[in-house]
Amino acid sequence: MEITLRIRRYNPEVDEKPYWAEYTLENVERTDRVLDLLHRVKWEIDGTLSFRRSCAHGVCGSDAMRINGMNLLACKALVKDFVKGAKGRIQVEPILGLPVIKDLIVDMDTFFEHYRTVMPYFINDEEPPERERLQSPEERAIFDESTKCILCAACTTSCPSFWANETYLGPAAIVQAHRFIFDSRDQAASERLAILSEENGVWRCRTIYNCTMACPREIPITQLIAEVKKEIGRR
Amino acid sequence: MKVHQFDAVIVGAGGAGLMAALYASREIKTAVISKLYPTRSHTGAAQGGIGAALGNHEEDHWEWHAFDTVKGSDYLADQDAVDLFCQEAIEAVIELEHMGLPFDRTPEGKISQRPFGGHTNNETGRPVRRACHAADRTGHMILQTLYQQCIKNNVNFFDEFHVVDLIMNDGRPAGVVAVEIGTGEVHVFHAKAILFATGGWGKVWQITSNAHTLTGDGNAILFRRGIPLEDMEFFQFHPTGIYRLGILITEGVRGEGGVLLNDKGERFMERYAPSIKDLASRDVVSRAIYLEIKEGRGINGKGYVHLDIRPETVNKYFAEEGSDRRIDREYVESKLPDILDFCRTYIGIDPVEEPMPVQPTAHYGMGGIPTNIHGEVVIDENNTVLPGLYAAGECACVSVHGANRLGTNSLTDLIVFGRRGGQAMVEYCKQADFVPLPENPAGEVEAELERLRNASGKTRVADLRAEMQEVMSDYVGVFRLEEGMAKAVEEIRELKERYATDLHVDDRGNVFNYDLLEAWELGALLDIAEVTAVSALARKESRGAHSRDDYPKRDDVNWLKHTLAYQKPDGGIELKYKPVVITKYQPKERVY
């Protein structure tokens, strides 16, 4: 196949503003990842093209980007998902809502600040037993979905509420809070719920479902946010 | 250039680095420096489980775990270290649970365990359930849990700082040099104690389960500073990578009953390992797959076999073996969700409907930076400690894995020896002083980075890397021969020459210059490739992952010893050897 990649480029040391650049690649396989194509551009054509990546199979969360208008991991987006014929175009740009530093790399500080705000860690101040704390498979299942999060930011940067107001903690931080709020072993649910019921918490969610669509781990994020809202109401 | 001072500096933020950080930061001023955001570390890609003899389902003992580990290592592991490792494995897993790690649970609410390759009931020889797991994302859960606890404990992180040198003064470690990736600025971290936890170097080979960033940085940095690398000829090829992509398919698939089948539909592991079949240790299974392929029994004659987890197949073999266990589609979905997702995404195959095409994939370095059981780096045949320098995790070699690591023991290694390294640094820093920084501590590596930044030869970094990967895959892979390895040494040296004289880098900038850093990483890979090939060429026997057609047998008379590879001042490599610690398990033939 022949694929033309249209990439949003910006180098702060050279460019006054971002621009679109096009690169045509031949001998592309239908099952190539978009990440493979970005690598081909970087390795064969222009080494200055910059993007984050590591594991290349959807578990490390480094390479969330906006591909044909959708937030995806470049390593989980396959050419055949976008192009059916022998020739085609794929557009790649940085995720929205966070400042662009260079090419496809954004400043993740706000994202991780929001993450830290929700106390994303296990809290139980009792002396632990000698062996493991017991938890039934049913109790464990309640928060299974939220344990899948890889902090790639695809959800938060697909959220119009976050685009409108970056102080909104955003779906990823709420998923992280959910993981502990519903863990039968944890003791700090009420503190986390208090944080999430503040002005920049769950009530900024307008149930738009972009986050659920964007999640590369298929976490039903909107549903998890609703569970948190309900829990706030219940208490 | 900015200078920072900490009691302890930890390089790398995977399982070992974060565990060390948790322990060190409680008592001493600690920094964690990582070229990635910590949650991007490759610990997160580990799938099947963490090994510990909890005995939650059936009888098990740490002594059985220890024997299995020694046997799996083909008797190259140090047995004093293995004993301690398997004892502490139990409390390490319990500690993770106390930190909140969401393990899968048994009906009674205990940590759920599954069978894994090479882990047995020592009395019956049958597989034992020892792999503590959280679905098929155990490593992800470990990485997240440790990072969460580091956040809770206000650990100092320097994210996206790439460490490129160890600062030595008069033979003593004084700190590290790092490039702040976002700005290109060079930072010096002055420290009393430095722990390397930089992970593996699978990118030396073409087909690998490893991340792009696993380039053996720590090993190369220390090697260049005169510290030896131990047992580098032993690199594990995991039997089941997705065909052509190398993405890992956990041994947990076979732990849950999955079987390997050749083109004739034969469960060929019955021939190679009659008692535990598909759950033989990884070196044995990888070799079996290669032999099947070599003898024309790959699927359609191609370079792969099938891994079958379809319930009808699994249940058929359960019945044949007289087991009353049965699985269904829902069970597979709940125990192996990520594996199903990888196959559906990347190869369009649904493993509950069709078998998966798999081939061995470069996976794990058993060798590495030599340490003792405290994570202290040791630099010679007498295990002399270099005070202030530590290593833990895959980059280190204690050695508990010897010539072949058992599945689940890598995660255990991170926790047991990460913790020990952290604790040892605390003790050391309480009584040690800072080694003064030498004059111009970053000068040497800055000069090398400037050379790379301005490199304007004809060879692109990616092309040179691909050539190295091809050479190493062809000649220093699953099967090895004298002639091929000699050729590999020669060719890697030629590639190093081109690296020094003809490299080309496009990006001359400072901000996120990954072009430059990839070039630097290639330098590390080339050094490691050379050490691996030279160490392998010298070892005239077959043991564990080092398998030679020309010396097909293990030779305990001449080769029951660890390799130590040193960089000579003229750039060549000198090999020395140190004895293996044998306590209660006398080497014997390895049969599964």
Image: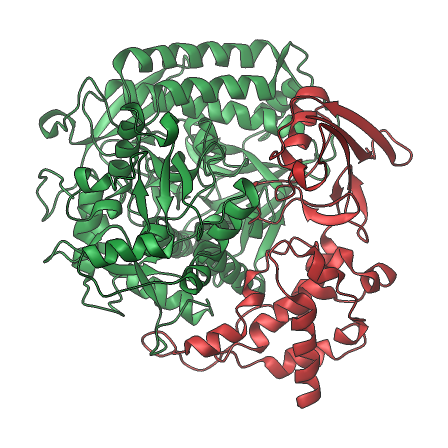
Chain colours: A red, B green
Number of marks present in the image shown: 0
Q: Quadrant of residue B515?
A: top right
Query: Is B72 drawn above or below residue B379 in the view shown?
Result: below
Q: Nearer the viewer, residue A42 or B255?
A: B255
**Residue positioned 62% across, 37% down in the render:** A33
Answer with left or right where residue B424 lies relative to residue B507.
left
User: Image quarter for residue A7?
Assistant: top right
In the orientation shown, which residue stands out farthest toward the right?
Answer: A16
Residue extending farthest bottom = A235
In the displayed structure, B380 sits above or below A172; it is above
Q: Residue at x 54, y 38 (%)?
A: B176
Name which residue lies at 51% across and 33% down. Answer: B167
Quadrant of the image for the C terminus of chain B? top left
Residue A136 in picture, x, y percent from top left: 41, 78
Q: Quadrant of the N terminus of chain B?
A: top right
Q: Residue B78, relative to residue B526: is it above or below?
A: below
In the depicted view, which residue is nearer to us: B525 or A153? A153
* Image location of residue B510, percent across then percent down: 74, 31
x and y percentages locating residue B88 in the rendered image: 28, 60
Residue A115, image x, y percentages: 67, 63
Q: Name the one closer to the observer, A180 or B289.
A: B289
Can residue A99 be seen in the rendering of this structure? Answer: yes
Q: Is residue B583 above or below residue B316?
A: above
